[in-house]
Amino acid sequence: MTESVTDTQTSVTTVVSRVVEHPAKSVWAVLLSAAGQAELLGDGASLGDKGDTWKASDGTWGITRSYHPCEEMRFSWHKNEDSPRTWVEISLTQLAPAQTKIQISHDHAHADFDVAAMTAHWEAALEYIDREAI
């Protein structure tokens, strides 16, 4: 499922989700792997602990805001050093022993934000997670 919403203040929220046939623990392991972090954030980036700054080789960067194992992670995301902050939340919901809903919500993007490109990025991340989880 993909959804984009524009509010009255020209802020855009993009939400992508997928139900995968893997337990949340396996999905979480992929999210924390070096390859999983590269899929989410870009090459060279690693979320770290709450309050840690991450930076990808393409210049995107942010700060880890919350981290709840097998449930949720939140981080800020900036296109470059001068761009405004946006928020990304990744949440996992265990639906059955081997079934998990993954939702990625990207909030507070400005109207000039390339929603199609970012949605494609998050969809590719979901595809990667589904493919790599066991």
Image (cartoon, rainbow, N blue to C red):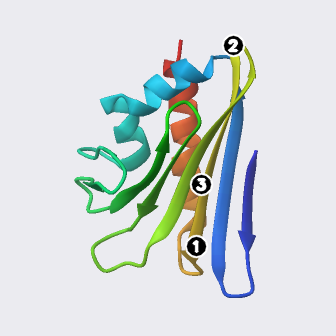
Secondary structure at badge 3 equals helix
Pinpoint residue 92: horizontal percent, then vertical percent. 63, 35
The residue lying toward the viewer, choosing from 43 and 116, is 43
Label 1–label 2 contact, CB within 8 A: no
Quarter location, residue 105:
bottom right
**Residue holding disc 2:** 98
**Residue holding disc 1:** 108
Q: CA distance from mark 1 to mark 2?
A: 33 Å
Whichever of callouts 1 and 2 sits on the residue coming sooner in the sequence is 2
* Residue drawn 42% across the image and 78% down it: 84
* Residue drawn 35% across the image and 61% down it: 62
* Residue drawn 63% across the image and 17% down it: 22
Quarter location, residue 131:
top right
In the image: residue 98, left or right of residue 119: right
In the image: residue 55, left or right of residue 105: left
Query: What crowding class fits label 2: few (fewer than 14 Cα within 10 Å), some (14-19), or many (20 or more)?
Result: some
Q: Amino acid at mark 3?
A: Thr
* Residue drawn 53% across the image and 40% down it: 124
For the N terminus, which image quadrant? top right
The residue lying toward the viewer, choosing from 123 and 87, is 87
The residue lying toward the viewer, choosing from 65 and 26, is 65
Pinpoint residue 121: horizontal percent, then vertical percent. 51, 49
Pinpoint residue 100: horizontal percent, then vertical percent. 69, 26
Q: Amino acid at mark 2?
A: Ala
Quarter location, residue 111:
bottom right
Would you place residue 105 above or below residue 30 in this image? below
Query: What crowding class fits label 3: few (fewer than 14 Cα within 10 Å), some (14-19), or many (20 or more)?
Result: many
